[in-house]
Amino acid sequence: MGAEDIFQQVRSVIERIGVKSIYGEPVSAGEKTVIPVAKVRYGFGGGFGKSETDKAGQGGGGGGGFIGSPAGFIEITPEGSRFVVIGEYRKIAAALLVGVAIGLLAGKVRRWRGILKR
């Protein structure tokens, strides 16, 4: 399998990811339509080598990955459209907890330094 074949396979995978992987099928109920939205990340890599001294000494390889996670949804109503984010509250809560933990740890270290200086 040559470099051209590998690149063709990578191209077909990227084309299959497409819009439906990012925006799901719209769901309608009454006058409201909801379109799910995902955050998608992907990466691919490959390499090939050929020996100058030995015509049979050649090789290649490649790989890739794909990650998708819900980002929110688009809500369409007669009054207008809006994007609703999913999961931001978790990030804010996690950042807040990390901040509190660092603050408590810094306070304890400061307290122990004060006790040790006496």
Image (spheres, rainbow, N blue to C red):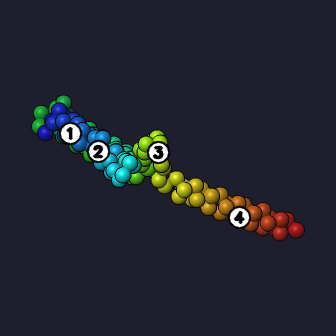
Question: Which amino acid type is shown beneath numbered disc 2?
Answer: Lys
Spot occupied by residue 83 in the image (x, y as percentages of width and height): 46, 45
Disc marking residue 83 = 3
Q: Earlier in the sequence, mark 4 or mark 1?
A: 1
N-terminal of the two: label 3 or label 2? 2
Residue under label 4, please give it.
104
Q: Which residue is drawn at 83% across and 65% down?
A: 114
Marks 1 and 3, how far apart in space?
A: 31 Å
- Please state which of residues 50 and 25 is positioned toward the viewer in this rendering: 25
Q: Where is residue 97 in the image (x, y as percent from the top left)?
A: 62, 61
- Residue annotated with mark 1: 12
Instruction: Specify whether 10 is left or right of 78.
Output: left
Q: Mark 2 points at which residue?
A: 20
Amino acid type for the residue under numbered disc 3: Phe
Tell me the mark number nearer the camera, choosing from 2 and 4.
Answer: 2
Of callouts 2 and 4, the N-terminal one = 2
Q: Earlier in the sequence, mark 2 or mark 1?
A: 1
Which element type, helix, strand or loop, lies under badge 4? helix
Task: Please report contact status of discs 3 and 2: CB closer than 8 Å, yes or no.
Answer: no
Q: In which quarter of the image is the C terminus?
A: bottom right
* In front of the other: 104 or 112: 104
Judge whether 83 appears above or below 3 on screen.
Answer: below
What element does badge 1 sit on?
helix
